[in-house]
Image: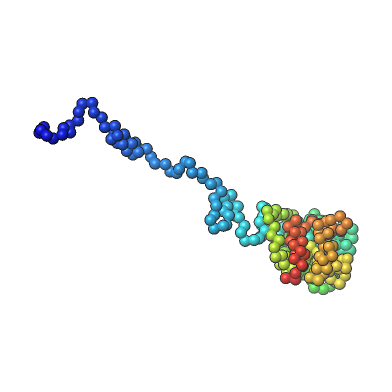
């Protein structure tokens, strides 16, 4: 070593603790795999959609259309006897003086599935051989049903009964269970009229409507809606005759829709 220059050679016993620590940390980081996520960041099991529309994580789509949301949804391709066929037959055929349990005109009692099928007027899977369809299609004559001056069944009702027979004329039933019932902007033409046509018009129409109430017209429905008789009857309140008189009570959602229509002033819309 030249004189006058500092001695840079390591001396016995001298250490470099900081350098050693840094090298150890660097090597350790190469050996340990990186984390996939921060374990201290909570994972939200119910993600929030920043668009304002709720995200479904259950497999059941969230209804954002404003329509009724159901828990149990019936098959729209099937015709259900209990909810669709029986109300039409009872309202138009199995009423007092015709084919009800008391009168049973011509020996026909059409008040239940068993009695309808045992009468022989329905041939499963064979519309053309079913007398029920033949007589309701007739526009005149002694066999035409319902007889004059009662209102004839609509083409939609005849098509529905025919479809039920084509599907096997089975004793089917399905009741939709609602999570929410949309009672906004209920219209007469879109909901009230079709409902009354199925459950009420058979008795309350024609030249001699039952109780003098014609419920196949807007004015007739409005009259009983405004005086309170309608809600009393369909909600089966004490002191009112239950309507529909024979058969099941209207669903809670249907009753709520009718009440909403009345609250809106019974619009003819």
Q: Locate residue 247, reporting x and y percent.
A: 81, 57
Q: In this view, does 38 lie above or below 15?
A: below
Q: Locate residue 100, reporting x and y percent.
A: 86, 59
- Residue drawn at x 83%, y 59% as measured from the top left: 232
From this viewpoint, is residue 225 visible? yes
Query: Image quadrant for the N terminus?
Result: top left
Q: Name the one closer to the observer, 126 or 155.
A: 155
Q: Name the one closer to the observer, 79 or 247.
A: 247
Q: Locate residue 127, reporting x and y percent.
A: 73, 64
- Residue drawn at x 45%, y 43% as measured from the top left: 38
Q: Which residue lies furthest to the front in this view?
A: 4
Quarter location, residue 154:
bottom right
Q: Name the one closer to the observer, 52 or 171.
A: 52
Query: What's the coloring here?
Result: rainbow
- Residue drawn at x 71%, y 65% as measured from the top left: 186
> Image check: 28 left or right of 169?
left
Q: Locate residue 67, reporting x and y percent.
A: 66, 60
> Image check: 138 left or right of 29?
right
Query: Image quadrant for the C terminus?
Result: bottom right
- Residue drawn at x 64%, y 61% as measured from the top left: 66
Q: Which residue lies furthest to the left in this view?
A: 2
From this viewpoint, is residue 167 visible? no
Q: Which residue lies furthest to the top in this view?
A: 13
């Amino acid at each position: 070593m030249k004189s006058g220059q500092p001695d840079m050679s390591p001396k016995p016993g001298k250490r470099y603790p900081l350098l050693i620590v840094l090298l150890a940390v660097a090597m350790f980081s190469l050996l340990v795999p990186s984390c996939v996520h921060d374990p201290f960041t909570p994972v939200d099991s119910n993600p929030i959609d920043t668009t304002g529309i709720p995200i479904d994580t259950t497999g059941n789509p969230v209804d954002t259309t404003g329509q009724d949301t159901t828990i149990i949804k019936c098959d729209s391709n099937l015709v259900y006897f209990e909810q669709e066929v029986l109300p039409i037959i009872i309202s138009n055929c199995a009423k007092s003086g015709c084919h009800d349990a008391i009168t049973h005109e011509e020996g026909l009692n059409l008040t239940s599935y068993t009695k309808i099928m045992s009468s022989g007027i329905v041939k499963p899977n064979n519309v053309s051989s079913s007398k029920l369809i033949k007589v309701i299609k007739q526009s005149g004559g002694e066999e035409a049903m319902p007889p004059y001056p009662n209102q004839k069944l609509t083409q939609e009702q005849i098509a529905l009964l025919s479809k039920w027979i084509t599907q096997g004329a089975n004793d089917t039933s399905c009741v939709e269970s609602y999570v929410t019932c949309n009672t906004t902007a209920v219209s007469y033409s879109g909901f009230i009229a079709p409902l009354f046509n199925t459950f009420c018009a058979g008795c309350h129409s024609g030249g001699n409507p039952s109780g003098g109430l014609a419920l196949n017209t807007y004015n007739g429905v409005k009259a009983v809606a405004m005086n309170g008789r309608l809600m009393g009857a369909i909600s089966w309140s004490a002191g009112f005759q239950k309507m529909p008189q024979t058969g099941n009570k209207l669903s809670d959602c249907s009753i709520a829709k009718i009440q909403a229509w009345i609250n809106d002033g019974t619009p003819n819309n």
